[in-house]
Image: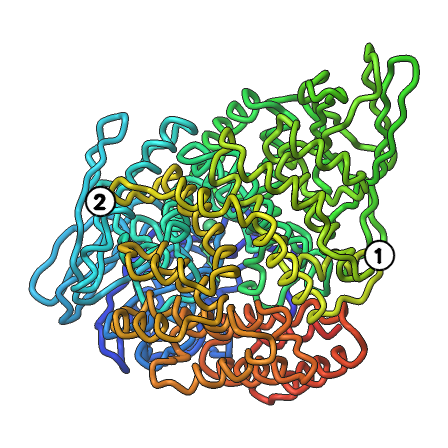
């Protein structure tokens, strides 16, 4: 397979003035007619006329009205074209019904829909399918479906046809078309300059009761982007469509966002608090793309973080404003560590701006998204809020309507703040998570912190240079008062000291407050110091972090030294959990144990080969000990956090339910599931129904509830996904393979539906001790299913193959078994480019 390089970028030979497309829909023989006005690009003398095109049947092609015979290849066509403006007309045939890859135009339950990012438009018609070619689109759809949608504004319609016009020049990856039997929930929003915008959320008949929350989230996002970034919406219509079969969460097509139904549909009965929060965040994310992505897009796909990092950062800010900022920061860091640090530490490590790829879909990663957002957060911290928003205004003004690069982005910050960002820019090109080592000393009232940064080699990058690291520090005196409030230490050298004077005694440092940079702090504080910070730190993130470090340390010593659960930790946890002054959501986060994968990652980093079974057992023992140690406070904790008002998925109520749910799962270890069964029987919302079901499974008392749940929800695909995945997640390590085998044999295990596939096979990869079972059955099952799915849906297969990316952490036997499975996948003759690139990188 061909490798593409950032360094090879060439501007397009031709630009496009406008595009007109006509779709004659038919499941296996859709005709797509295109009429495109090309003009020579004045910025280049290259006049090669190449159009991307894959899996298309060309019916006819014309230049300026004359039939031509282009040269066709697997990836597109070339033809002789004038060195002057000309009109291209083509007709192609495609087969949406047999398109199981869910990229290009495909069908989901009888409904037509599209997914073009990154390079799916070339499966619709011949076109320069690259983001730096932007054009206004006019679209005519002919089909018998009652609802026919495309980007922009509707211009005309009749029985069996509809026409749309999108005035905003856009790259082809933002094109969308939907045709089906759909029902809208409608709302409206008036922009601050007075534009009345109609908002529609389109769903299949029967799902209308799950749209209210998504619509409100859209309205909140529109308002927030005006208030915080001064960004207004720019069309009279905003459509969102829910689709059951979708490879990811959602897609920001101009004026016509398409969503995985799991990322938009929600009612209290069918969605959990976590689902609601995720939906709110994704709606915001896709909406925010209208400015960061659509109005200003990427020059090429190597610049993906330009839109994704910034848009993730913006949706994180939005959620912080809508809910609790500290809880949001903790959850984001948990995610970053679980996914991005893992990626950065293994064979799939790549820079925030990668320099090469075979299949760009493989680079929609935690590094581009989440680390990309962290880089923006650091920039904001370094320049300060005022300059950050000033720079953003300049960015929107200077680059509106353009396809840009990271250089353009940083230039804006250099111009507005006068800062030299050349060293900061390394965050975009250097892969790997920096380790931050700290030493401290105290003399004559002066406290000195000395930091040393170190980034280990990653694939293709043996040598690393020092980065600019903003380190937020606060100092506490031993009596618990804060003597130095949060101060930013700007580190840029490999080793650097910062001093604080005028102190009367040696302070206790609170380092990397708010997790001010995506680094690993290696400092091994004593458990006494951690307990002190857990009790006294004024920074909520570091307060939580101290408890987390304590829990990790306890678990690790249980695993490596056979220690018993540490009672000092249990006492500290008990004090924290009963502290009514703390937000319930915060306490729920603090009660949770570090994930088993996190423990494996930490053990590996300290040179210990992790034993998944030992990690599983230690976690279980510690949970049991926690339940026993907290036994006397659990009933009150559970009772005090019941919500008596009508269900609302807001931060306040969901925090209480999270804490009560955490208490319930501990109670279930003591009462055999009695309380959980009572909650299950009384539950009138999915959050409580599911937390009860999971507590019952924990207590080995879930058989009846599982059957009841299935009987109640068998016709609701999204709810049944939860039922599928929970059984895998909660299975005992020895049973995981059997549970997966049983579930995948059911007629309702439809592997073509990515949500269902992820519910079962994704949960297998997420079950540390089950996936890494010494029998090797977990590996074999995963490989079997990846091979099966690759023939249908390469994108989802490639994404799920990352379950294997930690294989070098484990012992020889496991490594051999995994290698055998990876090689078995690689040996498939028809393996997709997507999966072959991923498995190849994992094996390398
Ligand atoms: N931009 C899309 C992701 C497209 C993924 C293509 N494989 C959704 C988002 O980030 O908002
Ligand atoms: Zn995005």
Residue at image x 32%, y 79%?
Answer: 95
Residue 597, percent from left and from top: 65, 61
Above or below: residue 750 compared with residue 800: below
Give 837 or 216, whichever is nearer the viewer. Answer: 216
Report if residue 836 is visible in the image. yes
Horizontal and vertical percent position of residue 796:
49, 71
Considering the numbered disc 2 on the image, is that residue within a helix, a strand or a loop? strand
Observer-nearest residue: 502 or 79? 502
Q: Any mark on residue 140, and which?
A: none
Residue with the most extreme top position: 502
Residue 338 image point, x, y percent: 62, 55
Q: Position of 582 compared to 22: left or right?
A: right
> Could you tell me which residue is drawn at 76 percent across and 46 percent down?
434
The crowd level at tag 1 (other Cα within 10 Å; few <14, some 14-19, many 20+) is few
Q: Is residue 27 above or below residue 421?
A: below
As measured in the structure, the alpha-carbon distance from the residue carrying label 1 to the one carrying label 2 is 51 Å
Q: Which picture quadrant has residue 168?
A: top left
- The image position of residue 367, as x and y in percent, is 62, 53
**Direction from residue 687 to residue 393 in the image, left or right:** right
Mark 2 CB lies closer than 8 A to ligand 1: no
Secondary-structure class at tag 1: loop
| Picture quadrant of residue 737 | bottom right
Q: State which quadrant residue 439 falls in.
A: top right
Residue 462's disc is 1
Disc 2: which residue: 199
* Residue 286, placed above or below residue 412: below
Q: Front-most of 12 and 464?
A: 464
């Amino acid at each position: 397979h061909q490798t593409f390089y950032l360094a090879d970028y060439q501007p397009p030979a031709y630009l496009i003035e406008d595009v007109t497309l006509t779709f004659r829909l038919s499941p296996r023989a859709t005709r797509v007619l295109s009429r495109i006005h090309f003009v020579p690009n004045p910025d280049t003398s290259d006049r090669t006329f190449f159009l991307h095109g894959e899996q298309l049947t060309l019916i006819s092609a014309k230049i300026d009205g004359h039939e031509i015979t282009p040269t066709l290849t697997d990836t597109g066509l070339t033809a002789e074209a004038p060195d002057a403006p000309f009109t291209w007309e083509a007709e192609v045939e495609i087969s949406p019904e047999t398109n199981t890859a869910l990229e290009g135009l495909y069908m989901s339950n009888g409904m037509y829909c599209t997914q073009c990012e990154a390079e799916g438009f070339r499966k619709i018609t011949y076109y320069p399918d690259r983001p730096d070619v932007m054009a206004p689109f006019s679209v005519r759809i002919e089909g018998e479906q009652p609802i026919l949608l495309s980007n922009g504004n509707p211009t005309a319609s009749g029985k069996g046809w509809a026409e749309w016009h999108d005035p905003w020049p856009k790259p082809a990856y933002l094109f969308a078309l939907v045709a089906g039997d759909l029902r809208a929930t409608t709302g409206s929003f008036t922009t601050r300059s007075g534009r009345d915008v109609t908002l529609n959320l389109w769903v299949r008949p029967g799902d209308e009761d799950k749209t209210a929350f998504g619509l409100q989230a859209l309205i909140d996002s529109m308002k927030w982007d005006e208030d915080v970034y001064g960004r207004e919406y720019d069309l009279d219509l905003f459509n969102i469509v829910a689709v059951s079969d979708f490879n990811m969460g959602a897609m920001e097509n101009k004026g016509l966002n398409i969503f995985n139904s799991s990322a938009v549909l929600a009612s209290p009965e069918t969605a959990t608090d976590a689902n609601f929060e995720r939906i709110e965040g994704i709606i915001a994310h896709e909406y925010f793309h209208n400015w960061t992505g659509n109005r200003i897009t990427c020059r090429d796909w190597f610049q993906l973080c330009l839109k994704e990092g910034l848009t993730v950062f913006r949706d994180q800010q939005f959620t912080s404003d809508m809910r609790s900022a500290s809880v949001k920061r903790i959850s984001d860091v948990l995610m970053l560590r679980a996914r991005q640090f893992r990626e950065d530490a293994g064979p799939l490590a790549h820079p925030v701006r990668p320099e090469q790829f075979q299949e760009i879909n493989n680079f929609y990663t935690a590094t581009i998204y989440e680390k990309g957002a962290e880089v923006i957060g650091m920039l904001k911290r370094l320049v300060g809020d005022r300059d950050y928003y000033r720079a953003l205004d300049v960015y929107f003004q200077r680059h509106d309507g353009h396809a840009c690069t990271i250089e353009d982005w940083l230039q804006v910050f250099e111009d507005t703040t006068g800062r030299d960002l050349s060293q900061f820019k390394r965050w975009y090109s250097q892969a790997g998570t920096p380790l931050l080592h700290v030493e401290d000393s105290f003399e004559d009232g002066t406290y000195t912190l000395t930091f040393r940064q170190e980034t280990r080699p990653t694939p293709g990058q043996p040598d690393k240079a020092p980065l600019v690291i903003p380190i937020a520090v606060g100092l506490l005196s031993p009596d618990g008062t804060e003597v130095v409030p949060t101060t930013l230490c700007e580190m840029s050298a490999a080793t650097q000291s910062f001093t604080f004077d005028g102190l009367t005694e040696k302070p206790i440092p609170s380092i990397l407050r708010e997790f001010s940079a995506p680094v690993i702090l290696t400092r091994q504080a004593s458990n006494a110091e951690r307990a002190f910070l857990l009790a006294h730190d004024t920074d909520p993130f570091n307060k939580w972090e101290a408890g987390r470090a304590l829990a990790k340390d306890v678990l690790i010593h249980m695993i490596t030294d056979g220690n018993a659960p540490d009672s000092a930790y249990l006492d500290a946890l008990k004090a924290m959990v009963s502290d009514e002054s703390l937000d319930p959501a915060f306490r729920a986060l603090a009660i949770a144990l570090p994930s088993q994968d996190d423990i494996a990652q930490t053990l590996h980093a300290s040179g210990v080969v992790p034993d998944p079974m030992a990690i599983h057992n230690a976690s279980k023992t510690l949970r049991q000990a926690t339940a026993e140690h907290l036994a006397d406070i659990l009933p009150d904790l559970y009772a005090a956090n019941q919500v008596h008002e009508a269900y609302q998925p807001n931060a306040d109520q969901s925090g209480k339910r999270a804490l009560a749910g955490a208490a319930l799962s501990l109670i279930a270890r003591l009462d055999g599931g009695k309380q959980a069964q009572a909650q299950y029987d009384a539950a009138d919302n999915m959050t409580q129904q599911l937390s009860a079901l999971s507590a019952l499974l924990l207590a080995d008392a879930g058989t009846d509830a599982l059957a009841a749940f299935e009987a109640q929800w068998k016709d609701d695909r999204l709810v049944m996904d939860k039922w599928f995945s929970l059984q895998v997640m909660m299975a005992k390590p020895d049973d995981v393979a059997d549970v997966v085998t049983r579930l995948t044999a059911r007629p309702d295990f439809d592997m073509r539906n990515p949500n269902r596939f992820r519910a079962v096979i994704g949960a297998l990869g997420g079950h540390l001790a089950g996936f890494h079972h010494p029998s090797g059955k977990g590996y074999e099952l995963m490989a079997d299913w990846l091979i099966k799915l690759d023939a249908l849906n390469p994108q989802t297969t490639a994404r799920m193959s990352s379950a294997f990316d930690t294989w070098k952490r484990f012992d020889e036997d496991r490594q051999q078994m995994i290698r055998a499975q990876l090689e078995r996948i690689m040996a498939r003759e028809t393996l997709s480019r997507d999966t072959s690139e991923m498995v190849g990188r994992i094996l390398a």
